[in-house]
């Protein structure tokens, strides 16, 4: 992966008001703990060497946990560096509600899942789409101008953070 793609991703995140924090598998638990506001809920990451096990994030979700959560943590299957877009895959674990309902979303991204642009991302998503799967393309915090002034957090989180796991 070109260093330029990671740099572009970081710049695009900054442009849309998203904070990026870097971690390694060895520092992941401590790093994640520093960026979540408790109570926090999450879905299993499914990344080798990285999990939510030793973090303040609960993965035993109940409707009450989701309602009371200040932070939702999800794996991000792909990102689009050009726009700072997070591709949140739908799954039975609840990635969509966990990423959209709490006021803060923390997306956990493997370095190898940072793609340059939509053209590079689409072939990687084609099989998922053909199998009936879906994704949410999320760029920055939720915002709408439908009511006049720009309002954040109406259709999703008010704050988005990314933890980039280097070396994966």
Image (cartoon, rainbow, N blue to C red):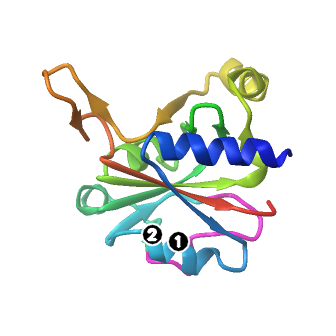
Question: Would residue 121 appear left or right of 103 to someone viewing this image?
Answer: right
Secondary structure beneath disc 2?
A: helix
Q: Residue at x 46, y 76 (%)?
A: 34
How many marks can you see?
2
Q: Residue at x 72, y 73 (%)?
A: 25
The secondary structure that dominates the magenta segment is loop
Query: In the rendered view, would you say 11 is above or below 82?
Result: below
Query: In the rendered view, would you say 157 is above or below 139?
Result: below
Rendered image: mark on residue 63: none
Q: Position of residue 128 (x, y in %)?
A: 69, 27
- Residue 53, image quadrant: bottom right
Taking the view exactly as shown, the residue that stands out farthest to the right is 1
Secondary structure beneath disc 1?
A: helix
Q: Which residues are magenta?
A: 45-56
Rendered image: mark on residue 32: 1
Query: In the rendered view, would you say 149 is above or below 156?
Result: above
Verify CB contact (< 8 Å) between mark 1 and mark 2.
Answer: yes
Q: Residues within 10 Å of mark 2 (few under 14, many from 20)?
A: some
* Front position in the image: 150 or 75: 150
Q: Position of residue 99 (x, y in %)?
A: 42, 47
Residue 29 lies in the magenta-colored region: no
The quadrant the C terminus occupies is bottom right
Q: For mark 2, what is the residue? A: 35
Q: Position of residue 118 (x, y in %)?
A: 68, 23
Question: Would residue 128 appear left or right of 91 to someone viewing this image?
Answer: right
Question: Would residue 42 appear left or right of 77 to someone viewing this image?
Answer: left
* Front position in the image: 112 or 51: 112
């Amino acid at each position: 992966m070109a260093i330029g793609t990671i740099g572009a991703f970081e710049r695009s995140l900054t442009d849309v008001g998203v904070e990026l924090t870097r971690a390694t598998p060895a520092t992941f638990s401590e790093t994640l703990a520093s960026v979540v506001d408790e109570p926090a809920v999450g879905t299993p990451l499914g990344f080798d060497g990285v999990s939510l096990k030793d973090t303040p994030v609960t993965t035993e979700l109940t409707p009450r946990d989701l309602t009371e959560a200040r932070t939702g943590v999800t794996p991000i299957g792909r990102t689009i560096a050009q726009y700072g877009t997070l591709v949140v895959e739908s799954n039975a674990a609840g990635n969509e509600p966990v990423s959209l309902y709490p006021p803060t979303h923390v997306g956990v991204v493997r370095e190898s899942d940072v793609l340059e642009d939509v053209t590079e991302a689409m072939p990687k998503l084609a099989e998922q789409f053909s199998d009936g799967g879906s994704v949410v393309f999320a760029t920055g915090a939720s915002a709408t101008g439908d009511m006049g002034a720009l309002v954040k957090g109406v259709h999703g989180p008010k704050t988005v953070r990314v933890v980039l796991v280097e070396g994966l």
